[in-house]
Amino acid sequence: MSVTPQDGLETDPRFPSGPWTGYYLQKELPGRQAMELILTFRSGEMTGEGRDRVGGFVLRGRYNLQDGTCHWNKRYVGMHDVYYKGFNEGKGIWGVWEIPSKAELERLHGGFHIWPQGMADPSSPHLAEEAELPVPTVEELSPAEPVAAPVSSSTQSAVTRP
């Protein structure tokens, strides 16, 4: 693990401590459900707190620098726990969550994706195109050859007569 001696925080750029953002998906709720988190990564252990539509929560888990795997337990204050398991490939952490239940049919689960605040949403499509700007050129016209000669009135009348 890469850690700095003064504070012990992780120095691997995939796991920066600080504010993170993201979402979870749940079949019963349409769309992305936003999350805000403050995470600390230190010596393979991750801790933090945050909030989402359910309420405030704390979390504690582990991360592995070798393969980027992560897992943690998110505990809503005074409510239930949610187990998260994911992978960090340098674009945040994505994976699955589950609320275990003794009855398999009651088990809630879904996907999630979180990333450090300030990073663009890695799950949104980004279209980009670059082109070089044209370089203006100046061409001087040579006055040696006239572009058009004036038409005389005698030539005009000869052309218009049948």
Image (tube, rainbow, N blue to C red):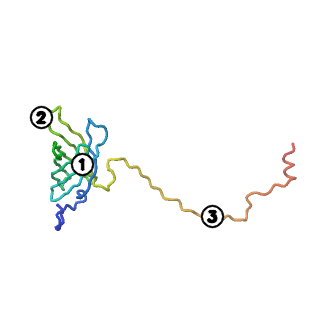
The structure residue drawn at horizontal position 17% and vertical position 68%, both measured from the top left corner, is 6
Spatial CA span between label 3 and label 2:
82 Å
Q: Secondary structure at mark 2?
A: loop
State which quarter of the image contains the N terminus. bottom left
Residue 150 position within the rendered picture, expressed as x and y whole percent measured from the top left:
80, 57
Could you tell me if the residues under marks 3 and 2 are in contact, i.e. CB atoms within 8 Å? no
Within 10 Å of the Cα at label 3, are there few (<14), some (14-19), or many (20+) other Cα atoms? Answer: few
Residue lying at the far front in this picture: please name it. Answer: 78
Q: Type of residue at label 2?
A: Lys
Q: Which-is-in-front pick, marks 2 and 1?
A: 1
Indicate which disc, 3 or 1, sits on the residue closer to the N terminus.
1
Residue 23 position within the rendered picture, expressed as x and y whole percent measured from the top left:
28, 46
Spatial CA span between label 2 and label 1:
26 Å
Could you tell me if the residues under marks 2 and 1 are in contact, i.e. CB atoms within 8 Å? no
State which quarter of the image contains the C terminus. top right
Residue lying at the far bottom in this picture: please name it. Answer: 6
- Residue receiving disc 2: 102
Asked if 134 appears above or below 35 in the picture, the reply is below
Indicate which disc, 3 or 2, sits on the residue closer to the N terminus.
2
Nearer to the camera, 71 or 154: 71
Q: Quadrant of residue 111?
A: top left
Q: Secondary structure at mark 3?
A: loop
- Residue receiving disc 1: 51
The structure residue drawn at horizontal position 22% and vertical position 62%, both measured from the top left corner, is 11
Residue lying at the far left in this picture: please name it. Answer: 102
Q: Secondary structure at mark 1?
A: strand
Indicate which disc, 2 or 1, sits on the residue closer to the N terminus.
1
- Residue receiving disc 3: 139
Q: Type of residue at label 3?
A: Glu
Nearer to the camera, 65 or 121: 121
The structure residue drawn at horizontal position 16% and vertical position 49%, both measured from the top left corner, is 72
Within 10 Å of the Cα at label 1, are there few (<14), some (14-19), or many (20+) other Cα atoms? Answer: some
